[in-house]
Amino acid sequence: MVVTSPISHRRTVLALLLLTFATGLVDAISVLLLGRVFVANMTGNAIFLGFVFVPGTGFDLAGAAVAVCGFLAGVILGGRLVRRFGHRPRMWVTTALGVEVVLLLVLAGLAGAGVLRYADATRGILTAGLAVAFGLQNSTARQFGVQELYTTVLTSTIVGIGVDSRLAGGTGQRAKLRYSVVATMIAGAVVGATLTRYFVAPIIAMAAALVTASLLLFRHG
């Protein structure tokens, strides 16, 4: 189902770009520290799961499976929320993003306190929790029907850049938005990868802050 955003299109795009930046931040953590696994980009994990049939690849296949299952759980939760509250868009989106914020803050707190670590079995809990958060985010963002801004995937956005480009005989329509989405996720990954040299849990808290900013835009924008 497509839900009409409770705020203007321009502010909706800004709110979704904040979520996209948060994706770059957290996927940088998961790839660099949680066993080369994605918690938001499931296409990569599907490829990794294919490696289970090839011995000696060196990838954490269990981590990929955990991430896919967690992401699917988040998507299911998001689907239930939109069907329950979708007729009240402002309440629905702030509820969904509020759940994501709480989950990210809990994970940041547990990681910061050393309860969840990045190099032992407990990282599976962190992987699963982050995947649930971004599955919920994706299933929420996609309800607005802005194809370029599902906030956790770029494939269709990059395809759109090429297909509608002047080189392909197109008009370049929506190119500015599409380039902005790609640049935003890359920027998030750059910041996340840079900061992982110094700390990790605060990056998850930073992602929670970005989701909170998006939530406030939807709530009060």
Image: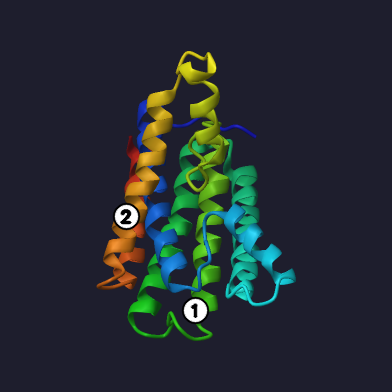
| Residue at the far left in the pictured view | 198
- Assign the C terminus to one quadrant of the image: top left
The residue where tag 2 is placed is 190
Amino acid bearing label 1: Arg
**On the image, which quarter does residue 29 sit in?**
bottom left
Helix, strand or loop at label 1? It is helix
Q: Secondary structure at mark 2?
A: helix
Which numbered marker is on residue 123? 1
Residue 17, by quadrant, is top left
Q: Residue at x 48, y 51 (%)?
A: 95
Single out the mark in the foreground, 2 or 1.
2
**Callout 2: 10 Å neighbours few (<14), some, many (20+)?**
some
Q: Is residue 208 above or below residue 123?
A: above
Residue 172 horizontal/vertical position (percent) = 45, 18
Dot 1, how many residues are within 10 Å of its Cα: few (below 14), some (14-19), or many (20+)? many
Left/right of residue 187 with respect to residue 27 in the rendered view: left
User: Which comes sooner in the sequence, label 2 or label 1?
Assistant: 1
Q: Position of residue 96 (x, y in %)?
A: 50, 51
Of residues 205 and 58, which is closer to you in this image?
A: 58
